[in-house]
Amino acid sequence: MDLDRLRGFLTFARALNFSAAARQMNISQPALHGQVRQLETELGVKLYTRDAGRLQLTEQGRALLLFGQNLLDEVRCFETGLRGEPQSEELRLGAGLTATLYLLPGPLRDFRGLWPDVECRVGVHHRADVLALVRSAELDLGVTSIERTPADLESFVCARTRHALIAPAGHPLAGGGRKLTLADIAEHPLVLPRAGLQHRRMVDEAFRKAGVEYRAALETEGWEVMKHYVALGFGIAIVNDLCLAHSVPPEIVSRPLHELFPERIYRAVWAKKRQLPAPAREFTTHLRKRYTKGE
C-alpha cells in the first residue's frame, strides 16, 4: 500500500470534502481525487459513496481510516526511533463543556503528574462532533453525554447525573416542602441554554409533554454563566447537578428535580478497532479506575 495515497485518503476521510482536504495537503483537488481512486483500484473496494450530493465513507472506508491511522502512527514511531529522536507524544481529548469543566480536571492533573512530558490537547466540542472526531482518529478519546455506546465505539461510564432547580435565596421556590412540578417552575422566568443544545431540547420536550409553557428570561450557554445570572436575580434555572458539586454562589439555593427529568450519562469513548497511543491508553486506564471506583 502506497503511504502517500494512504495519507491522502486519511485527510479526505476526515474532511469528506476533496477540495478542503486538498488544501490541507497543499495539492490540487484532481491530484487528491486521483490518489483515492488509485487506492480503491489497488484494494479492489469502494471507499466512499455520494448520496444526494453528500460524500460518505463505506464500511471498507471506515475500516481503512482506522487501520491507516494505526499504521501511520506506527511508521512515525519507528522512523523517529530509528533516527534516535525522542518520541513526540501527545494526548488528544475532546469533550463537551460540562465534562471539560467537571470531569476532566482531576484526572488530567493526576495524569500530568505521571506523564509530565506529554502534551495534552483538550478540545471543547458538541456531542456529535466528539463522536465524529473520535471515529476519524483526530481525537484519541472523547468524554460526552450518550445513553448507549455506538456499535463502532467502546466506552465506559464516567458519571451519572440528575437535574436540579437553582433559584436566588429568598425566591418563592427556594424553600423546601412539597416536590416541585413543571407548572410550579413555569410560573417564574427561566434562565436557559440557547436553543438547539441538548439540555434545552430536554427542557422543551418535558414542558411540551406536560402541556405547560414556560417564560424565558435569558438565553446563554454554560452552567457557570447560568449560575451567575441566577445569582444576579435574572430568573431561575434547571441545571445538570454535576455543576453543583463545585463552586456555587452563596446567593443560590438548589432543589432536586430527579423525577421531572431523565438521568444524564457521561461516557468516555474511543474507536473500537483503533490501537490507541501509549499516553491515551494510560489516561483511559486512569480515567476508568477513577470513576468506576466512584471517586
Image: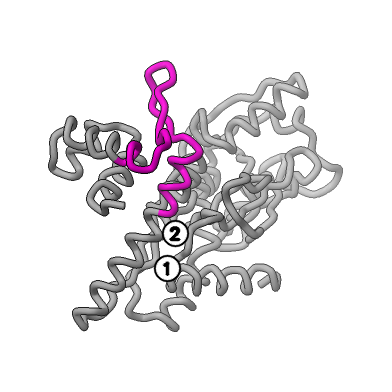
Please give the name of the residue rendered at 46% of the width and 71% of the height, measured from the top-left corner: 108
Judging from the image, what secondary structure is the residue with disc 1 in? loop
The 10 Å Cα crowd at callout 1, few under 14, some 14 to 19, many 20 or more, is some
Res. 170 in view: no
34 relative position to 223: left or right: left
Residue at the (44%, 59%) spot, across then down: 140
- Residue 137 shows in this picture: yes
Q: Nearer the viewer, residue 238 or 145?
A: 145
- Disc 2 on helix, strand or loop? loop
Q: Position of residue 176 (x, y in %)?
A: 80, 49
Relative to 217, residue 75 above or below: below
Instruction: Report the colour scheme.
Output: one colour
Question: Which segment did they paint magenta?
Answer: 39-67
Location of the C terminus (image quadrant) = bottom right
Q: Which residue is mark 1?
A: 277
Which mark lies nearer to you, 1 or 2? 1
| Residue at 50% over, 38% down | 59
Task: Tell me: residue 159, above or below residue 146.
Answer: below
Residue that mark 2 sits on = 140
Disc 2 residue type?
Asp
Q: Is residue 187 above or below residue 43?
A: above
| Residue 117 placement (x, y as % from top left) | 32, 79
